[in-house]
């Protein structure tokens, strides 16, 4: 494989997912809705209620407070907003496919470039030990294989996206 061809393959393998992500239409940021709607998944902290990053579902809310069904204890708490130090609303889940592919490609490129095949054990072999190929070619193959494997692993990992509705420092209340 020519060196120039290998460079183009590696460049396209690493740039295409990023370019595809950049081509998405810009979505407007959701507005901070206050108070959160009933049924919204929230993460809240309220020190006087001994809640620190608790996740639950809003059962009811008005302009003074909200009733939250907590996931951890399966209990319902009524929390006035002036007691809440932090409130985040879930905006859904996302998969880490692109991040996994990029990390796998980087790791695969490093491993491919730094590893060499074992020479033949027979010293009388008339063909001699294998050359092992071009290290750059091994790096390209390692990057492609690592990118595919990393993308598969990343697509299996799901994380939740949280949007802060408000965060109030206790000294400012």
Image (cartoon, rainbow, N blue to C red):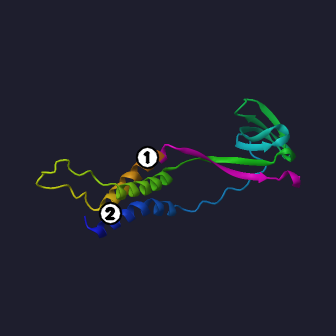
Which of the numbered marks, if any, corresponds to residue 136?
Answer: 2
**Percent x, y of residue 61:** 80, 42
The crowd level at tag 1 (other Cα within 10 Å; few <14, some 14-19, many 20+) is some
Name the residue: 75% across, 46% down: 36
Q: Is residue 122 above or below residue 138?
A: above
Q: Is residue 163 above or below residue 78?
A: below
The residue lying toward the viewer, choosing from 70 and 147, is 147
Determine whether the residue tagged by mark 2 lies in a helix, strand or loop: helix
Residue that protrudes farthest toward the left in the picture = 126
Q: CA distance from mark 2 to mark 1?
A: 24 Å
Label 2 close to label 1 by CB (< 8 Å): no
Q: Is residue 161 magenta?
A: yes
**Percent x, y of residue 89:** 70, 47
The residue lying toward the viewer, choosing from 38 and 129, is 129
Name the residue: 81% across, 48% down: 85
The crowd level at tag 2 (other Cα within 10 Å; few <14, some 14-19, many 20+) is some
Is 107 positioned to the left or the right of 7 in the image? right
Which of the numbered marks, if any, corresponds to residue 152?
Answer: 1
Residue that protrudes farthest toward the bottom in the picture = 4
Quadrant (top left/top right/bottom left/bottom right) for the N terminus: bottom left
Name the residue: 66% across, 58% down: 29
Is 4 positioned to the left or the right of 121 in the image? right
- The magenta-colored residue range is 154-173
Residue that protrudes farthest toward the front in the picture = 123
Q: Quadrant of residue 132?
A: bottom left
Which of the numbered marks, if any, corresponds to residue 38?
Answer: none
Q: Quadrant of residue 9?
A: bottom left
Q: Is residue 111 magenta?
A: no
**Percent x, y of residue 54:** 73, 39
């Amino acid at each position: 494989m020519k060196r120039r061809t290998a460079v183009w393959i590696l460049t396209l393998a690493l740039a295409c997912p990023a370019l595809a992500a950049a081509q998405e239409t810009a979505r407007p940021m959701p507005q901070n809705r206050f108070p959160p709607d009933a049924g919204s998944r929230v993460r809240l902290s309220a020190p006087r209620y001994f809640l620190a990053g608790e996740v639950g579902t809003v059962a009811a809310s008005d302009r003074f407070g909200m009733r939250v069904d907590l996931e951890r204890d399966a209990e319902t708490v009524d929390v006035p907003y002036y007691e809440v130090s932090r409130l985040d609303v879930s905006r859904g889940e996302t998969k880490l496919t692109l991040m996994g592919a990029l990390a796998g490609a980087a790791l695969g490129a490093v491993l491919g470039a730094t590893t060499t095949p074992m020479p033949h054990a027979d010293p009388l072999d008339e063909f001699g030990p294998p050359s092992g190929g071009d290290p750059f070619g091994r790096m390209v193959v390692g990057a492609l294989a690592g990118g595919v494997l990393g993308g598969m692993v990343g697509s299996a990992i799901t994380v939740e996206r949280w949007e802060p509705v408000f965060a109030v420092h206790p000294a400012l209340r």
